[in-house]
Amino acid sequence: MNPLAKQLNETIENENPYVYAMLSSLGKQIYFPKVGILSQSAEAKAKAGKYNATIGTAIENGQPMHLKVIQDTLSAYDPKDIYEYAPPAGKPALRTAWRSKMIDENPSLAGKTFGVPIVTNALTHGLSIAADLFVDAGDSVIIPDKNWENYELTFGIRRGAEMVYYPLYNEEGTFNADGLRAALFAQQGKGKAFVVLNFPNNPTGYTPNRQEGNEIVSAIREAAEAGINVVVVTDDAYFGLFFEDSLQESLFGQLSDLHERVLAVKVDGATKEEYVWGFRVGFITYAGKNEAILSSLEQKTMGIIRAAISSCSHPAQTFVLRALNSPEFHEQKMEKFEIMKGRANKVKTVLDSGKFDESWGYYPFNSGYFMCLKLKTVHAEELRQRLLEAYGVGTIALSDTDLRVAFSCIEEENIEDLFNLIHQGVKDLEKAAVK
């Protein structure tokens, strides 16, 4: 094992042996090289005042070399902020700005010890990093039965985890904390569990309320007290899009100092929060009891990034940083929030009218981009195909009964027409079945 990896492991084990036990075999072996091209280049950048011949970029007239046809479309930006490589952990000013944003939007983080967010290539990359660091073949990854399908690829296929499911909703239509607790305690024999909490939920658009959030935290605390090491990742992809009386902040704050056997990891990003899907700017943040353990986890994370993609897009980071620092940022973001809220409220008004009750019910939703219909008389895949072929309407079939509708991409004035067409598709299939 590389001496740097060994040193990081010793630090983590000394500070918290339970967190050390959570590391995967890859997580134990990975490190960020302190003696190598990047470190030597960083030293040269600080000291080589005459000639810096260290790194694979081209310089012309004291600036990063670039093509005019590209720079003409980016003239508002200094070439050094878009063409050079970004550091492996991300642009320092952006990391600092995102951490400040997290504190502003999550009051429960006050007084908690957590690191500076590390930039990832959006949220999928952040989840993948967490999987690499903490999941080995056969480890249990606990997610609800209604989940983003990429979890199976990220944790199951890539890392060989055993996917453990529990029903998202209980009989009252609220978050099933008892199901989460049962799934956690089923891992006592392994002594380790990896939990993903995704709120607002994809595909249902559900976020628990404060009481339900407390029940989730209690379930995780009880598992830790029973001797289970728990890695908890809050997948906060749709953070901030809370339209009703639900939690208004991430559970990362409550989980960050919950128990010595609990490691809280926050994965979030500008992707959905700031409506920049194609920029691919995300973040991964760790909570821990002190700077030593946080630094070690961050060094390992940088090692994963260095080994996989080297660093994330510098232009995209620069664009996001400029937005965060703009005096118009909050006003413009609130404008978009109100549009999204209006669409969600319109969906509920249409669905609660009673005109579709014989065809479907719907799962509780209060946030995010999506909602799910629970079909009563037809198969979701057959309906999906009928809607495409006959009406030019796209939806997502999740199971025999569940059809996901993304209201995020439908103008409010078109929402009633959308559901009328879905209903017509149901009627078409019912009529065909009778024949």
Image (cartoon, grey):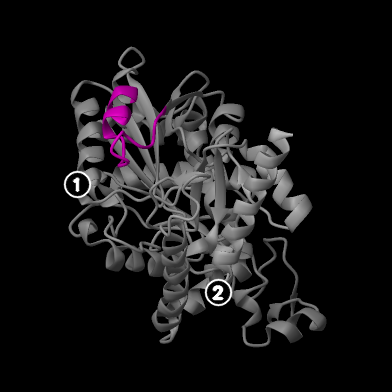
How far is disc 2 from disc 1 in space, using C-alphas? 35 Å
Instruction: Find residue 168 and report its horizontal and vertical position in percent.
Output: 38, 36
* Local secondary structure at mark 2: helix
Q: Is residue 187 magenta?
A: no
Q: Residue at position x 62%, y 83% from top?
A: 78
* Local secondary structure at mark 1: helix
Quadrant for the C terminus, please.
Answer: top right
Q: Where are the magenta residues, as a range? A: 166-183
Say whether residue 203 is visible: no
Instruction: Find residue 7 and report its horizontal and vertical position in percent.
Output: 40, 34
Mark 2 or 1, nearer chain start: 1
Name the residue beneath numbered marker 1: 211
Q: Is residue 291 above or below residue 216?
A: below
Q: Relative to residue 241, is residue 435 drawn left or right? A: right
Name the residue beneath numbered marker 2: 413
Instruction: Find residue 222 and report its horizontal and vertical position in percent.
Output: 19, 28
For badge 1, the amino acid type reads Gln
For badge 2, the amino acid type reads Glu
Circle number at residue 292: none
